[in-house]
Amino acid sequence: MKIGIVSKIFILTTSLCMLILVTIYFGQTIFFKQYYANQKVKEIETSMQSFKNAYLMAGENVPTIQKLEQDFYEENTTWITTLDSVGNIKYGNDFSVEIHLDSSISKDFSNRVMNIPLYSFIGLEDLQRVKYDFEQDNRITIDGVEKEDTVIPAIITVENTNAALENGQLTEKLYGKRAAIEPVPKGSSEIYLKGVIKKLQLPEGNIGLNIYTNRMFIDRIKQFQVDLLFNGNRNSHAEIMDYEENNINYKIFISPIKDATGKTTFIFAMTSLQPVDEAVQMLGDYYVYLIIFVLILIILASFYYSKKIAKPLLQINETTNKIASLDFSETIPVTSKDEIGTLSHNINTLSKTLHSYINQLQLDIEKEKQLENTRKEFISGVSHELKTPLSIMKSCISILEDGVASNKKEYYFKAMTKEVDKMDRLIVDMLELAKFESGTYKMKMEVFYIDQVIEYICEQLAIDISNKKIHVHKQFSNRMVVANQHRIEQVITNFITNAIRYTPEHESMMISTIEEKNRVKVCVENKGAHISEEHLEKIWDRFYRGDASRQRSKGGTGLGLAISKNILELHRSQYGAMNTEDGVLFYFYLNKKV
């Protein structure tokens, strides 16, 4: 069974779209979540490396470091901060209480001023309910752990108030919660301090971007601090940990570095994978409706595009069938710039080219017929031109053979010689004309004075002019022209010879050169009979003698003007002949030398 191209394209397009849909479905439901998480981790690791370099360059410049943390959050949507060697937030004095310790305590801390971070105990949003308990000069008690000359408070109590704040993760480890009490971490010791509150310091600026507002992030820092205190050394290598809360996955990045003093600093960052979880969950719920919609869309789109793609192909098939039958009347509409549009354009071009070649072939056939007619006319003209001198020579020979009028032998020999000369000139002119009409002759251009050429020709024809007692008037412009001097001499000689031949005795003729803008007009005008208007354009044809006044008896071969015409056309020169008041004017133009 034959399947049409529309059906083939429809089936192929539908199958391909279904394959793509199935691939996308499995890719998004199975691989996309893991791919997103891996890409997110790689991007954050790269950004953290840049953050490390910038952090080390910043030194102890707190505003610069805070700006780096803010930029990191804005670029990666990831919270980041730096922790000291015991897990406290470095540069966290902006959310702390300053205490002047009593002199009665341990000599290591006696009379010292200490900043106790408050983020481990309370959030910014809950600070208002205990803010007034931390007024200046209130006494405060601290229970906690001392490590590396740093106090990590577990419980803070403000005397004579109900204010008591607790670091839940640390107190659970230290004092237990319905379980055995954990031993004090190695290298640490419990400590009990008292003092007087000197100042409460709170964050300023945009609270929304402050890490203290993110209690989950702070809780992970507190948990990391507890692990750092109780689970040994974590200074050797970077860590990436997974964390889940409320069915939301997070990635935690911990990277230890050595600062300028040689102490360990931890870069601590946390990012949420909630966006991709939500997207994957939404896609999973929505895919039932999505698949139905996409299936309908695929079928409609496949049908539409199969028809759209097949339509120009069907048009191409119909048009090429007509071209095969030599019917070039129909073209294919080009409606696109793709390969089908290019194919349609090429077929249209091919159709036009074939049509043009066929028309040209028909014109060539017609032209060949015209040339054949011209050849016949040419042969007829040559035959006619040769017939008269041959008849004269034959009559002379018969008379001489019969011995009739033997006393006029010299007269008949001169008559035959004259006819032989005429045939010789005819043959030379025929060869000359054939050379010009061959289309292969090239004119070699040169620069010369046209007036000097005319003077020379007039001197050569002085005897003919004198015999008819013709008065020659000359008017020259003394300009140089660009042409083939020998061939232009031939044209001027022909024009002047014709003028002499058809000018009555004791009349005059005018030869002039007129300078125009970029060319020189050469004119030869003679007094005498006019040429009828219907013959003016035909006098340039070979053997043409339409005017009774220009018969063979005047002399010439009938090819002179035809030769002149070809010479002037090879020069791309404008030429012509026209009747004047008293005679006929022949003219042509030549380019001036610039």
Image: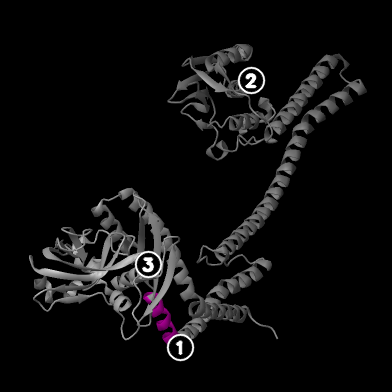
Residue 109 position in % (x across, y down): 21, 60
Label 1 residue SS: helix
Image check: 253 left or right of 422?
left
Image check: 60 left or right of 29?
left
Residue 288 disc label: 1
Vertical side of 283 occupied by 261: above or below: above
Earlier-in-chain disc, 1 versus 3: 3
Residue 23 position in % (x across, y down): 54, 78
Vertical side of 257 occupied by 571: above or below: above
Label 3 residue SS: loop
Q: CA distance from mark 2 to mark 3?
A: 123 Å
Image check: 556 left or right of 416?
left
Residue 486 disc label: 2
Give the camera-side residue of 50 and 182.
Answer: 182
Label 2 residue SS: helix
Could you classify mark 3 by the number of other residues whose Cα lies within 10 Å: few (under 14), some (14-19), or many (20 or more)?
few
Q: CA distance from mark 2 to mark 1?
A: 96 Å
Q: Is residue 265 visible?
A: yes
Q: CA distance from mark 1 to mark 3?
A: 58 Å
Amino acid under label 3? Lys
Give the camera-side residue of 355 and 376.
Answer: 355
Q: Which residues are magenta?
A: 274-287
